Amino acid sequence: MLGGHPRALSTLFFTEMWERFTFYGLRALLVLFLVDAVESGGYGFDDKTATAIYGLYTAAVFMAALPGGWIADRLIGAQRAVMVGGALMTLGSLMLTIPGPKQLFFGGLVVIILGVGLLKPNVSTLVADLYPEGGGRRDAGFTIFYMGINLGAFIGPLIAGWLAQRYGWRIGFLAAAVGLPFGLLQFWLSRRLFNGAGAQPNRNDGGAGLAADWQRLRIALAAFAAVAALLFSGAVHLDPARLAQGAAYVLVGMAAMYFLYLFFGAGLDPVERRRMVVVLVMFLGVASFWSGYEQAGSSLNLFAKRYVDRMVGGFEIPAGWFQSVQPAFVILLAPVFSALWVQLARRQMDPAAPLKFAFGLLLMGLGFLFMVAAANIVAGGASAPAYLLILTYLLTVFGELCVSPVGLSTVTKLAPARLVGQMMGVWFLGSSLGKLMAGLIAGGFDANNLAAMPDRFMGIVLYACGIGVFLLLISRPLARLMGNVR
């Protein structure tokens, strides 16, 4: 045990750290690369197209978590899913470094999406397996795990952003690819620490439907490959902005169908159904939260590049470095929040998850008031001071620590054991919807109409705070539906 936590937590901490190093190193560069001029090595897309692509990519990463959870639950187990997902992420990242047609670059993004879909939900499931008793200790374990996420997210943009500015975009993408193989090696060598958790599928039919499930997977992969071939061959042309709008409807439809299945076709007992009502509300809450928070990689990333005074002495801070501010705050503050939840739980004062979600949305919304101030400065013709952007990130991190690790932990507690992997997929599906909405919101910022920018940021304030107040009002009834889960 390490500080009262299982030794396996350190393995999962570093596995996820390197995965996030890869993902966030790329995230810091993607929109900036897409809008950069062709002669400077970018693709020269307009803001609306670039942010739509960014939204589609980040949404698809989390949308893939639902089938990724299903594959682990039904076919290969969480441990193998983590290994295969990490290998795919490494391959996709390396594809981004190869100069060539755009199809190769976007193909690399697709491979990364598939890899994250397998790795992300299942490494979280393994964390949950370390704490079968649940409670505040599991929340604390997830918060420590969340520090690993943010350590990788902090380091990745610093290294990839600096190398991209100094040596070019492809070198920056290469830097993002190098860490994950080390995380996978440690995971493989330390797998005995899991005591068999996640080594096998979590089936309740004794394997009777295994062959049929493999056939379903093969059909799905064939259909996916056919669609990808049509897109990458140029036989079908799509407008990323319109595709993002259509994808939002698809995600809402997927979520609606899955929750209908849970309530009416999954064989849940009355207690489990009541808990699924809470999961549904948390799904809507996390989607709303990420639609604002994920402005960091899109509209706020472009804002930092174009409108923030980034000069320190004679050194110009790479815009991508601001993507490390949020993870740095999480690293500093996560132990504080972890200790807070444990101490409140000991005093029987730990707020229920819905109440924490309400606080998170309110804090995130209030954080964007600083961007309203920054946008007013820019609309007046001056460069915005960096501290306003940093203060926005600080309050969004306060919100993040009330939502993300708490949500990860709570969903695993509320889910029936046979559906934990799929429930993690549902959680990430909510994140996917929020990130897609974030790309659409970011596309509404017009670089040629700076006077409208303050109102756009104020819209995020009102939207997030309004939902936060609503959750505050219904948090007590939702806590009763949770029963003895805390």
Image (cartoon, rainbow, N blue to C red):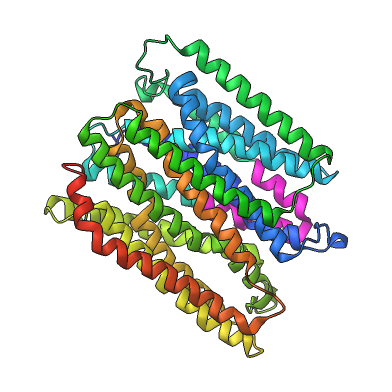
> Which residue is at 29% across, 58% downward?
356
> Which residue is at 45% across, 33% downward?
122
Q: Nearer the viewer, residue 1 or 150?
A: 150
Q: Left or right? Give the position of 148 relative to 479.
A: right
Work out whether 123 lies above or below 380.
above
* Camera sees residue 257: yes
Q: Quadrant of residue 91?
A: top right
Work out whether 72 lies above or below 205.
below
**What span is in magenta?**
152-177
Residue 365 among those drawn in magenta: no
Residue 286: percent from the left, percent from the top?
A: 41, 53
Instruction: Give the position of the N terminus as an image quadrant.
Output: top left
Work out whether 76 lies above or below 337.
above
Residue 438: percent from the left, percent from the top?
A: 55, 60
Q: Residue furthest right?
A: 39
Residue 160 among those drawn in magenta: yes
Q: Quadrant of residue 360?
A: bottom left
For the stretch drawn in magenta, what is the main secondary structure? helix
Residue 24: percent from the left, percent from the top?
A: 58, 51
* Camera sees residue 188: no
Q: Residue furthest left?
A: 347
Residue 416: percent from the left, percent from the top?
A: 29, 31
Q: Nearer the viewer, residue 403 or 231?
A: 231
Q: In the rendered picture of this protein, how many numbered marks are placed on residues?
A: 0
Q: Quadrant of residue 245?
A: bottom right
> Which residue is at 85% across, 44% downward?
101
Q: Residue furthest bottom?
A: 380
